[in-house]
Image (tube, rainbow, N blue to C red):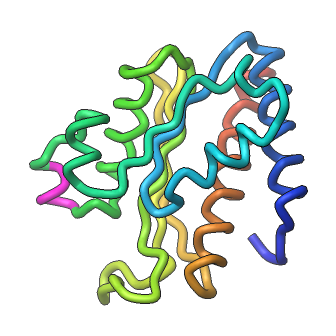
Amino acid sequence: MGGTYSMSNLEALAAELGTRLLERGERLATAESCTGGWVSQVITAIAGSSNWFDRGFVTYSNEAKADMLGVSKKTIVRHGAVSEPVVIEMATGALQRSRAQWALAISGVAGPAGGTPDKPVGTVCFAWAGPEGFAECETCHFPGDREAVRRASVIHALQGLLQRFTPLLA
């Protein structure tokens, strides 16, 4: 994820995702923590996105993750909010609590504080969940200040879902 991305680039990425979802006749839900709804904002900036975007969950606190998405408190205690097990539960919870066929989830340490030796600032976990039990996750480390980490996270989440469509369309 190199380079600087303007809002119009983000909107172009979201528009491409929307086109792909429309072609598939499917909808998306988001579950965001460190991005605070930025993915949902980029998506809803696209006219007509209500045809392919169902809803967004902003679950910044651990309590919100548990209450709104059904993330197990045991999973949060065992692995921490910034972990692949938590984002998988966020994504699957968003699917279960929406009318979407696809969900993406993001939880990370955007900084400037909050980092630890195991999870330094810039650590962000992603999950994508979809039809027939599809679920994948990954952890990335992004450089830069809080805004740079959050922007890179939005881009990675959207690009990640587009990449996961590719093998499914073949």
Q: Is residue 97 visible?
A: yes
In the depicted view, which residue is nearer to us: 110 or 120?
A: 110
In the drawing, does residue 15 fall left or right of residue 76? right
Viewer-side residue, 30 vs 123: 30
Q: Is residue 76 magenta?
A: yes
Give x and y (percent) for residue 81: 28, 60
Residue at the (83%, 68%) spot, across then down: 5
Displayed quadrant of residue 71:
top left
Q: Position of residue 57 (x, y in %)?
A: 44, 39
Q: Is residue 109 left or right of residue 45?
A: left
Q: How many marks?
A: 0
Quarter where residue 114 is shown:
bottom left
Q: Is residue 35 above or below residue 164?
A: below
Up-down relation of residue 164 to residue 132 (above or below): below
- From the viewer's perspective, is 123 left or right of 22? left
Q: Does residue 69 show up magenta in the picture?
A: no
The answer to whether any part of residue 137 appears in the image is: no
Q: Mainly helix, strand or loop, the magenta region?
A: helix
Residue lying furthest top in this view?
25
Q: Residue 74: where, in percent of width, then height?
A: 10, 49
Q: Is residue 103 above or below residue 99?
A: below
Magenta-colored span:
75-79
* Residue positioned 70% across, 22% down in the render: 50
- In depth, the one of 35 and 25 nearer the eye is 35
Quarter of the picture holding the C terminus: top right
Q: Residue 45 in the image: state x and y as whole percent.
A: 78, 42
The quadrant of the rendering that contains the N terminus is bottom right
- Whether 37 is drawn above or below 150: the answer is above
Q: Is residue 118 left or right of residue 141?
A: left
